[in-house]
Amino acid sequence: MELINFLNENYYVLVPVLWVIGYALKQTPKIPDWTIIWFLLGISLVIGTIAFGFSIDGIFNGIIAAGVAVLGHQMFKQTIGARSNTKNEEKTKKSK
């Protein structure tokens, strides 16, 4: 079962919003990388409870939305990174 199946469809829009916020935080030099996931979790909980009500389901969906955003970003980043590393290795082998 996929993580997205646990997320209420009302929270789908929150995932790209968290990606944009995460990107902005990553570009901010005074914010350490390890704190970005905690900021995203807090923002997700606040936005989720304001927009969809304060409840246990709202809290769980806020946590899941932050998880989907971070997981999705890492999957994208590592896939693109693996592809570029493979291409660089092929170029290095050809030049030798």
Image (cartoon, rainbow, N blue to C red):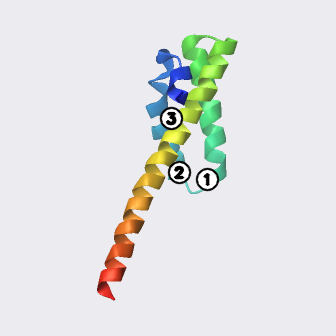
| Amino acid tagged 1 | Asp
Q: Residues within 10 Å of mark 1 (few under 14, many from 20)?
A: some
Residue 44, how many percent across, how many down? 59, 28
Are the residues flagged by discs 2 and 1 in contact, CB closer than 8 Å? yes
Q: Which disc is residue 33 wearing?
A: 1
How packed mark 2 is, by other alpha carbons closer than 10 Å (few <14, some 14-19, many 20 or more), is: some
Q: Is residue 73 visible?
A: yes
**9 left or right of 88?**
right
Q: Nearer the viewer, residue 13 or 29?
A: 13
Q: Is residue 63 above or below residue 29?
A: above
Give the CA separation, mark 2 to mark 1.
Answer: 7 Å
Residue at the image position 52 percent from the left and 36 percent from the top: 69
Check residue 18 in the rendering and tell me which mark sits there, or answer none.
3
Secondary structure under the numbered disc 1 in the rendered image: helix
Is disc 2 placed on a helix, strand or loop?
Answer: helix
CA–CA distance between discs 1 and 3?
Answer: 15 Å
Of the residues shown, which amino acid type is indicated by label 2? Lys
The picture places residue 35, in percent across and down from the top left corner, at 66, 47
Q: Earlier in the sequence, mark 2 or mark 3?
A: 3
Mark earlier in primary sequence (1, 3) = 3
Callout count: 3
- Residue 31 visible at all: no
